[in-house]
Amino acid sequence: MSSLRLRREDPPVLEEWYRRHLGPDIHDISSSGVHPYSFAEIRDLCSIPAADLDEIVMDDSVSQGGAGIRQAIADRYARGDARRVMVTHGSSEAIALTLTTLLHPGDRVVVQEGIYHSLGHYPRAAGCEVAELPAAAVRDGEIDPDVLERLITPGTAAVIVNFPHNPSGLTLSPQGLTALTERTAATGAVLVWDAATAEIAHRWEALPDPGAVGGGTVSYGTFSKTFGLPGLRVGWAVAPPELLTATFPLRDRTTLFLSPLVELVAERAMRNADVLIGARAAEARRNLAYLTDWMAEHQDLVRWTPPEGGVCALPVFRELERAAAGPAAVERFCLELLSRHRTLLVPGTAFGVPHGARLGFGGPEVSFRAGLTGLSEFLRTRGAAR
Ligand SMILES: Cc1ncc(COP(=O)(O)O)c(C=O)c1O
């Protein structure tokens, strides 16, 4: 018998689902990212000759991120101020480092309902008093002003949101963002803003990064979503320099820094962001147009709110809603869809929505359409069997 005494924690539903069910030869219409690029495509689109790779000295990098990649991120998202940028192992690490450093037990923290799991985890793990910003309070690009005033009170330490929201695709209008930043500024709360898919907007123009203007805001970005580089594992935080340096002790004891090889690829990708994002955003928009027609044809079976930004949506299946089915039903639904049609969705249980699923439309067009065909057959067959 093993003598290991392990501390067990429940994994996030989303990651466990992918661990178990993401595999080759499936139509993955579940992702919150776009069609990933191959390394050959990156080298071509971003002009990275083999000689540049050969010149890299595989030495240590530095805690806040190498100068080149930091400046490239700052030029696009932080008005050129590289002191406000930290480069991390995905934005996951930026979230972990900054929230662990920022939050204290007993802090009052407002967290958007159904938020990406790690953004909700750290305030709870720190022993904060968490108040939820209800999903229903976000409508037509605005957070209900009464809710803003009631929730974000003087003394609130932080407000943590993700727009465009993964998975609903709802976002704020420029006026909605202004109202939020004015309220956080008026109450002294730190705005923590996850902008993972900010570069792809549908209903309004892409929002500026609220971290860019300075002040206390913390914002996160990543190469994993709209850049099509999830395997690069690079993200960043834009934040006050004193917060970034205060994260160093934790980073010193965990990941230290990134590889100079990864930093060089990331720097070139950032300098060519418009090319990388542009092609994938165009594909996502074609998929969204196709999906919009598909939703209209299936409105007897599915309802949705069209996404306003990003590359995913949260359709709700009417049969599950009508039956007031418990959370296990949508997981069974997604598993059957996968086994019968090799089509992957993420059950809404990963986001606290028991009758829906995350549907991503950023993937390769052919596979996306094949996945929707599978979902269509699946829904119609189930409908007929009732
Ligand atoms: C909203 C949001 N934030 C952050 C992340 C973390 O991504 P990464 O660590 O790949 O940058 C994700 C990943 O799915 C996400 O959806």
Image (spheres, rainbow, N blue to C red):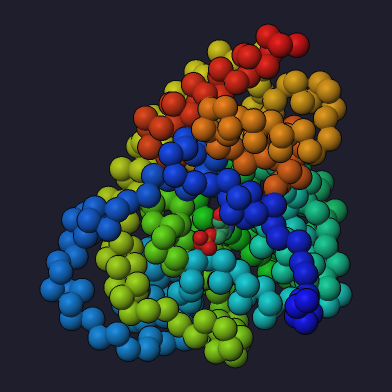
For the point 38% across and 37% down, the residue is 364
Q: Quadrant of residue 92?
A: bottom right
Instruction: Write down which quadrant ligand 1 falls in.
Output: bottom right
The residue positioned farthest toward the front in the image shown: 1
Q: Position of residue 169 (x, y in %)?
A: 58, 40
Q: Is residue 348 visible?
A: yes
How many numbered marks, from 0 up?
0
Q: Position of residue 381 (x, y in %)?
A: 63, 14
Q: Quadrant of residue 233?
A: bottom left
For the point 83% across and 30% down, the residue is 325
The N terminus lies in quadrant: bottom right
The one of 146 and 342 positioned closer to us in this rendering: 342
363 on left or right of 273 = right
Question: Looking at the picture, does residue 383 appear above or below residue 357?
Answer: above
Q: Is residue 145 visible?
A: no
Question: Looking at the picture, does residue 161 appear above or below residue 326?
Answer: below
Question: Looking at the picture, does residue 6 appear above or below residue 43?
Answer: below
The C terminus lies in quadrant: top right
For the point 39% across and 68% down, the residue is 73
The residue positioned farthest toward the top in the image shown: 384
Q: Position of residue 80 (x, y in %)?
A: 38, 72
316 on left or right of 378 = right
For the point 13% across and 73% down, the residue is 51
Q: Quadrant of residue 304?
A: top right
190 on left or right of 104 = left
The one of 28 and 194 positioned closer to us in this rendering: 28
Q: Position of residue 354 (x, y in %)?
A: 77, 37
